Amino acid sequence: MKKAKEKFVPSEEQMALMPDVSGNDVNGLGETEIRRPSPIYWQTPELTPFGPLMQFFVDRAPRDEHLYKTQMKTDEIRARTVPPVSKKRVEKDAVDWSQLVKEVGFESGAVAVGITKMRPEWIIDTFDVPYENVVTIGVAMDFENLKTAPDVPAAAEVVKQYGRAHLVTHSIAAWIHEQGWNAVSYGGSNNVPILLIPPAIESGLGELGKHGSLINREQGSVLRLGGLVTDMPLEYDSPDEFGVDDFCLNCKACQNACPPEAIHSEKKMVRGIEKWYVDFDKCLPYFNEHTGCGICLAVCPWSRPGVPENLIKKIAKRKYHKL
């Protein structure tokens, strides 16, 4: 007999720090008008009512040497400055620049690079973004580490890959500066002023999964994202649809595995867009009392090495037979 999933109950210590406002309300759950998002987590604590809960998470972090060293390395990468813009501007057309930007991204460690035009509703409402071309990159987590979620190896892997994401966007921005154009590197963690998943979807890096994260056609659900903006003329990419939406509608792997039951079986309206949505008020307490989480990504069928290609073939075959 299958063992019943134990119900998660947040600690009284954490619940005492919960603000009066719902995180789902901050995120715009149920709102039918498109608007800019508000800061909610991994921002300067003063910007969000959930600032005390961020400190709660940090204070509870395991005293693990590998995790500590990984975090210090990522912090060092994040703090690096990009060299100033060259006074000599190189001129090329958008197609050539886009190809070169992607080459720099891949050479720097990205497994996916996409380009699109910034939309106002992707910019967090406490920030300004100076340029309209956004480059989104993806780096891949190691599945063997990811599948230990929510334990330390998975947490260290997340921190490590966010460090790589910062390294990639810094490298691209530095290269753009060498060509005499402007760029701002945001990486993928801590005070990033834009949402990263929407431009990643718009530029062809994947589709949104039921677990609220990106699913890429080659890497599945193991991507961590980073971004930068630039005034360099670039050619925009197109979205890549390969059947994730229908697959997630029928799959319940992440939904059934989520300890706080934060994953919905149907899409929700969020700031004027109907999409998959993870209940913030249920997810955060579990995340905070463990070493982060990532269980939903670990159990996602798309995460397993070698599986995405086979899933896409099966989806295409099923779609063909329905014609």
Image: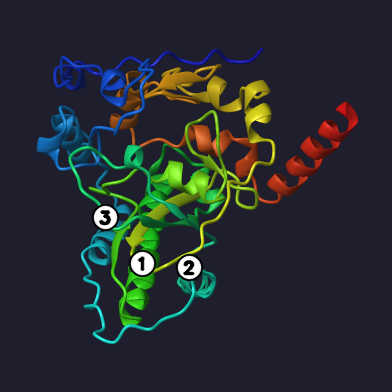
Instruction: Report which residue position mark 1 lands on.
Output: 167
Disc count in the image?
Answer: 3
The residue lying furthest to the left in this view is 46
Residue 27 image point, x, y percent:
31, 25
Instruction: Report which residue position mark 3 lands on.
Output: 68
First in sequence: mark 1 or mark 3? 3
Q: Residues within 10 Å of mark 2 (few under 14, many from 20)?
A: some
Q: Residues within 10 Å of mark 1 (few under 14, many from 20)?
A: many
Determine whether the residue tagged by mark 3 lies in a helix, strand or loop: helix
Tell me the distance, in whole angstroms, between the alpha carbons under discs 3 and 2.
Answer: 23 Å
* Image point (38%, 49%), residue name: 118
Instruction: Report which residue position mark 2 lands on.
Output: 109
Which one is in front, 101 or 13?
Answer: 101
First in sequence: mark 2 or mark 1? 2
Tell me the distance, in whole angstroms, between the alpha carbons under discs 1 and 3.
Answer: 19 Å
First in sequence: mark 3 or mark 2? 3
Quarter of the image where one finds residue 123: top left
Q: Could you tell me the amino acid type at mark 1?
A: Leu
Q: Residues within 10 Å of mark 3 (few under 14, many from 20)?
A: some
Location of residue 201 with respect to 32 vertically, above or below: below
Residue 74 image point, x, y percent:
29, 60
Q: Nearer the viewer, mark 1 or mark 3?
A: 1
Q: Could you tell me the amino acid type at mark 3?
A: Tyr
* Image point (65%, 24%), residue name: 251
Q: Could you tell me the amino acid type at mark 2?
A: Gly
